[in-house]
Image (spheres, helix red, strand yellow):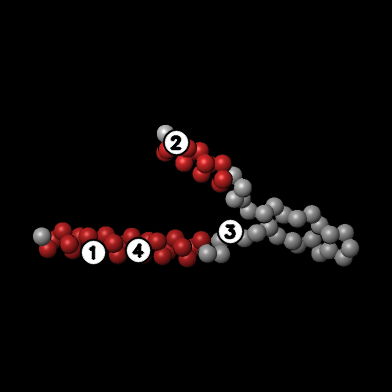
Amino acid sequence: MKKLILIALFAIVSLGLFAQPIPPPISHGSTGDQQGAPLDGGLSILLILSAVYGAKKTYYLRIKKIDK
């Protein structure tokens, strides 16, 4: 039951975690090239670091298994 409540709470809370929409153009001298919030800033770095960490962990577990 706790697990179901936790999953439901996580789903409800995560609904508000979307990127910002593109703001409406400003009428006084706007160039019209406004952008929304970027999503790729740290995501690529996070994915690379997690892959390196997983490879390191796999390597050490494999060496530990061979030593036994």
Labels 2 & 1 near each other (Cβ < 8 A)? no
Mark 2–mark 1 Cα distance, whole angstroms, equals 35 Å
Label 2: which secondary element: helix
Closest to the camera, between mark 2 and mark 1, is 2
Labels 1 & 4 near each other (Cβ < 8 A)? no
Mark 1–mark 4 Cα distance, whole angstroms, equals 11 Å
What kind of residue is marked 3?
Answer: Leu
Classify residue 59 by image quadrant: bottom left
The residue indicated by pointer 4 is 53
The residue indicated by pointer 2 is 4
What kind of residue is marked 2?
Answer: Leu
Image position of 9 (left or right of 27): left
Work out whether mark 1 precedes mark 4 in sequence or the reverse, and give the earlier one.
4
Q: Report the residue at 58% width, 59% height from top.
A: 39
| Category of crowding for the residue at label 4, using alpha-carbon neighbours closer than 10 angstroms: few (below 14), some (14–19), many (at least 20) | few
Label 4: which secondary element: helix
Residue in the foreground of this view, choosing between 18 and 30: 18
The residue indicated by pointer 3 is 39
Work out whether mark 4 precedes mark 2 in sequence or the reverse, and give the earlier one.
2
Is 6 located above or below residue 61 in the figure? above
The residue indicated by pointer 1 is 60
